[in-house]
Image (cartoon, rainbow, N blue to C red):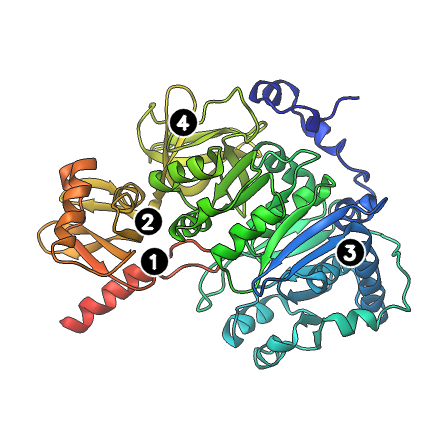
Amino acid sequence: MTRLTDFTSYADAQSHYSKAKLWDLFDGDRECFNIAHECIDRHVDGDNTALRIAHADGLDEILSFEEVSRRSSQVAHYLADQGIKKGDRVAVMIEPSLAFYAAMFGVIKTGAVAVPMFSLFGPDGIRLRVGDCRPEIFFTNAEKAEDAITGGAKNVTVVDTGFLTSLDHLPAQYDLETSDDDLAVLQYTSGTTRALPAAVRHDHRSIVTLMVAALYATGIRPGDRFFCPSSPAWGHGLWHGTLAPLAMGVSTGTFSGKFDPVRLLKALQDFRITNLTAAATHYRMMRNTGVASDYTYCFEKLSFTGEPIDSETAAYVEQVFGTKVRSMYGTTEIGVIISNYPGADDLEVRDGAMGKAVPGVEVEVQRADGTPADPGETGELMVKKRGKWFPTKDLGRVDADGYFYHGGRADDVIISAGWTIGAVEVEDAVLSHPAVAECAVIGAPDELRGLVVKAFIILKGAETEGLITSIQDHVRARLARHEYPRQIEFVTDLPKTPAGKVNRKILRDLQAEKLAAAE
């Protein structure tokens, strides 16, 4: 019997895909289904590698499916002994390591609900989430235990080597009693710690739907050596970077500790990674090291998400890594809906395009009145779910051949003197200047024009005389003359969400506060 993993082309994706065939990739059925079994337990035969973890301190941690299966079963027995039952919340705030995966999959095996939390949260961020989901146990490391207690968590438990060793007497298998619609993971979207982001509910069958993204957005196939440096506290790192490859029995890798792009480059070389998915920011940071070409790579497939990648970085990645980096687009709430199908040789990768809709998904660009936009016309990206159009809150356009292009968040559009300007397009032009390392663009209030384009820029070197004019002239030459940044502020860092995306809202708020203070 052929399976969806047997096909790689775009044409085959359109002709062979069906929801029923997604279930053929798994052991379980609707009555008996558990993510931990599908990702770990069923792949224990032999000494197959499940995870390769590049620690910031230089340590490489290699974990087999068997070790993660055994340790997570022992954690599940521990939780049962503590009175944890189906539906209870258990928080997991640990950097990627055996401790993290044993805890996460152990929670999921019991039928409890795992709540991954970003390990850099302080007491305020913890307090918001603990107050919302009320976990019965809070798994963390020794360094963050005090923050968890201060943040109001109860039953704070340090999971480390000593803790796992103390469970050696417990059975290495755990009897699973979950169905496909039981809740498995409660995951908060990225955002600031000053306001509680949305909590997205994932049941066990969510991993079946996830296979659409795995097959067509990251292009995972048996035999890949996969890697995703995004934290598994967030959707990209957990679902696309961890659960999706493991569900196919594919080894995956990740980064642990304070992110270092040079350390990442070395890991990609040493682990002989063939398939990498990362945030656009990761690729930009690797480019900015200036040493990416010093390493050797085995890449066959590259993908990115989070925000558009600038054209200069995309060209650099293709030159140094040997293949184009392909976009995937979606949100934690709706999943991946558009991609460039990594591994599909019959699909042209057009510069700047997010790609085409994934199989089984209907995407449309719509005007404000709900009518379909014409090819090339900017509108809001909408996706059809359960027979109704669902807003993505992103702008975009589609060309005559069905390729979608990102136009930025709806609230990132700048209306200046009647002109509509996209922040993403201006950022791309600014980033192509040789002196610019990073950039974020917002609309700044202006008495004459309403708003003007303002660019916050991190330089590669020191500021030099005439640099502002040089950047403005550079943008004028690439875009329409009204789109250049009339205001430029050089900064040493940019506010970002924990998932690595530039947080333009914070820049807009800071700009408003600055203007209010000047009045």
Say which residue label 3 marks. Answer: 68
- What is the secondary structure assignment of the residue under circle 1? helix
How far across and down, in percent of the image, does residue 371 sit? Answer: 37, 28
Instruction: Kindly report the distance in space between the C-alpha atoms of the residues bearing marks 3 and 1.
Output: 40 Å
Badge 1 amino acid: Lys
Point out which mark residue 350 bears: 4
Labels 3 and 1: the sequence-earlier one: 3
Residue 306 in view here: no
Labels 4 and 1: the sequence-earlier one: 4
Instruction: Kindly report the distance in space between the C-alpha atoms of the residues bearing marks 4 and 2.
Output: 26 Å
Say which residue label 1 marks. Answer: 505
Instruction: Kindly report the distance in space between the C-alpha atoms of the residues bearing marks 3 and 2.
Output: 43 Å
Say which residue label 2 marks. Answer: 411
Answer left or right for 47 relative to 302. Answer: right
In the image, residue 81 above or below residue 403: below
In the image, residue 231 above or below residue 181: below
Residue at x-position 62% and y-position 18%: 15
Badge 2 amino acid: Asp
Mark 2 touching mark 1, by CB under 8 A? yes
